[in-house]
Amino acid sequence: MNHRLGFLGAILWLSTTTLSAQDVTALRDVPSTYVYPSSGFLPFNIHRGTQTMLSLMLRGAVFDNPQGIACALLKSDQDPHDPKQDVVVTAVGVNSGAGQLIYNVGLKDLKCFGTTGKGEHQFLNPTGVAIDRDGDVAVADTGNHRIVLLKHDGLRLRWVKTLGKKGKEAGEFNNPLAVAFDSQDNLYIADAGNDRIQMRTPRGEYHVLDIQGLQAPCALAVIDEKEDWTFYRQGVYANRLAVIDQMGNRVQTFSLDGGKFLAQMTADQIADPPMKLSGCAFDYYGNLVATDFEKSCLRKFDRSLNPIVSFGAPGEGDFEFTAPRGIAFNRQFGQILVSEQDSVQYFWNGADALNLKIFQSNAKEHFAFFLTERALVTVAIETSDGKMIQELAHEKDLEEGDQELDWSPGVSIAPGAYQLKLTVMATYSSRDRVVKEQVEPFTY
């Protein structure tokens, strides 16, 4: 492997490389809705790109108010005959205070583009970024009240043109904060100062979406049925737009044209306040994951925006965040990038079982738990010293949410001390690499 491999290139290459004879990592006593890659997938098992790493990889570069982040598997890097060899995912991050983008080029280099200013190749406090599989890049150039279009040709970013100017008409902007492409190359723009979402077609036509009551939308995400990697191909969950507004205090979902309101969640409804959302992205199963700047965590919402789990805590250790901002998913492999105050973190999609409860009724033992992700679940009854008595389920595919499995002990089972061994594994990404195990004693 090239020792000059940039951090983003390194994590995105190694994460999609299939290693033979890889042991499964069993996690206990740590959160696992999202997990770090198992040993052997990253150089020195590094999963956080710090300022020190950035300085080593890109001389002179300094994290200066990082904001949005985006990633895509470029068509030019895709192997149509063997998807497992699609090892290059391109990521672009906004380094807002420096007026620049930081991005990887293939497997070898980390580069930056732009300086602070108002002209060509310049940005003024940019915030959001999006990239599609053709290498088209859009940047919300917030301070310049415009959208900048760039092209990633596999070797470098190059300037294409700017869109708009400050104003209120369609195709004009006032402090745009976020951008997102759908699979048909329509570009959605959070036009914060005008309290609206605009959509630009590939032909350059602008449409102001018919969404009432928006207040300074600051982040958005889209998912549609024609994407290569999405679970829902029809129905209400197939085509959606998510919008964060009210200074991060509200998230809503709509139909892609904005004409139909679907769901919302507000800060005063959340069970574990405070909440100030900054960025958001849809995962493969259509759940929405948002960064919470105030609480320094990720918040995962289901398809109806009901809270599933808060992941992480403030800090600089594992499974901790410092004022996270942008978030990006590569849905094909379940890879997640999160930008924060002075670093960028990398995760795989995982699964966790929360609130495990064991209780008796009608001569049965009941095992209840809450899944944070659709998962393959194995449940075994063991003696207190770990000897197998009975396996109730083996890699059973269960949906996220409340689950319960029951055990009816046979006449040969003597009363006494036993233990439940519960194992959950994500259905993709970390599947067969990382599992979460819980062992809970009980008396029958």
Image (spheres, rainbow, N blue to C red):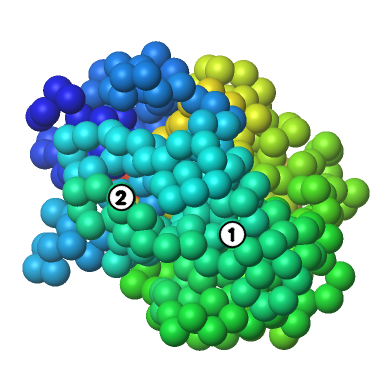
Is residue 162 positioned above or below 93 on the image? below
- For image coordinates 43% across by 80% down, the residue present is 202
Q: Which residue is mark 1?
A: 146
Within 10 Å of disc 2 (Cα), the crowding (few <14, some 14-19, many 20+) is many
Q: Residue furthest top?
A: 52
Q: Which mark is residue 93?
A: none
* Label 1 CA crowd tier, 10 Å (few <14, some 14–19, many 20+): many
| Residue sitting nearer the eye, 357 or 334 | 334
Q: Amino acid at mark 1?
A: Arg
**Residue 440 location (% of width, % of height):** 57, 30
**Residue 10 visible in image:** no
Q: Nearer the viewer, mark 1 or mark 2?
A: 1
Q: Residue at x 19, y 44 (%)?
A: 106
Q: Earlier in the sequence, mark 1 or mark 2?
A: 1
Quadrant of the rendering where the N terminus is positioned: top left
- Mark 2 lies on a secondary structure that is strand
Position of residue 364 in the picture relative to residue 158 (left or right): right
Task: Determine whether, in the image, residue 261 is placed left or right of residue 311.
Answer: right
Number of the label disc, if any, that sits on residue 157 = 2
**Whether residue 175 is visible:** yes
Please say if the residues under marks 1 and 2 sit with CB atoms less than 8 Å apart: no
Which quarter of the figure is the C terminus placed in? top right
Q: Position of residue 164 (x, y in %)?
A: 59, 67
Pick whichever, 33 or 319, lies toward us.
319
- Amino acid, disc 2: Leu
Residue 172, given in percent of the width and then of the height, sits at: 66, 70
Query: Which residue is rendered at x = 17% and y = 35% of the image?
Result: 108
Q: Is residue 163 left or right of residue 231?
A: right
Element on which disc 1 rests: strand
Is 225 rendered above or below residue 83?
A: below
